[in-house]
Amino acid sequence: QVQLVESGGGLVQAGGSLRLSCAASGGIFSNFAMGWFRQAPGNERKTVALIDWTGSSTYYVDSVKGRFTISRDNAKNTVHLQISNLKPEDTAVYYCAASDSNRWDSGLLEAYDYWGQGTQVTVSS
């Protein structure tokens, strides 16, 4: 079983930045593609950014391209999401998740088997 713990969320003003981190344990981290997802109040959980096993391939939803950067450090079993130019519509609980599926870049939540508890990001206008 893989355990994932997110950190780095908080309350920031619009235009600000945050760096979210996700620490993994209980598995071979480099065997998993990783993703960041978010869920705003009253909305479904949605894909934000994905990264493959080595970090050489990434995917971003259109609404975050140019503002969000996903990265991973396989030596430290961590994945990060650097968020800049935050907007009020970025307010959500952000989750990291792990996938050992070859559908990791499909954007489908069901391709991800392991999930963290989430970290709240609130952006004030």
Image: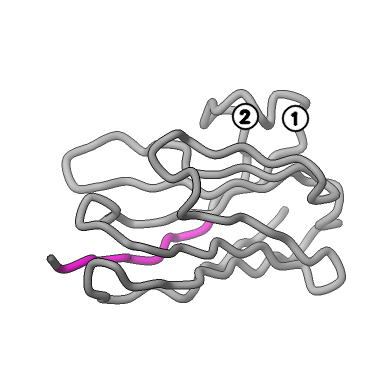
Q: Neighbour class for label 2 at 10 Å: few (<14), some, many (≥20)?
A: some
State the residue position of label 1: 101
Identify the magenta region: 116-124
Decide: is 11 above or below 22.
Answer: below
Residue for point 32% across, 76% down: 10
Q: Nearer the viewer, residue 13 or 115?
A: 13
**Helix, strand, or loop for circle 1?**
loop
Q: Quadrant of the C terminus?
A: bottom left
- Marks 2 and 1 sit apart, C-alpha to C-alpha, by 6 Å
The three-letter code of the residue at mark 2 reads Ala
Q: Position of residue 110 (x, y in %)?
A: 55, 28
Residue 111 is labelled as 2
**CB atoms of marks 2 and 1 within 8 Å:** yes
Q: Position of residue 26 (x, y in %)?
A: 77, 63
Magenta-highlighted stretch: main secondary structure? strand
Decide: is 38 above or below 78.
Answer: above
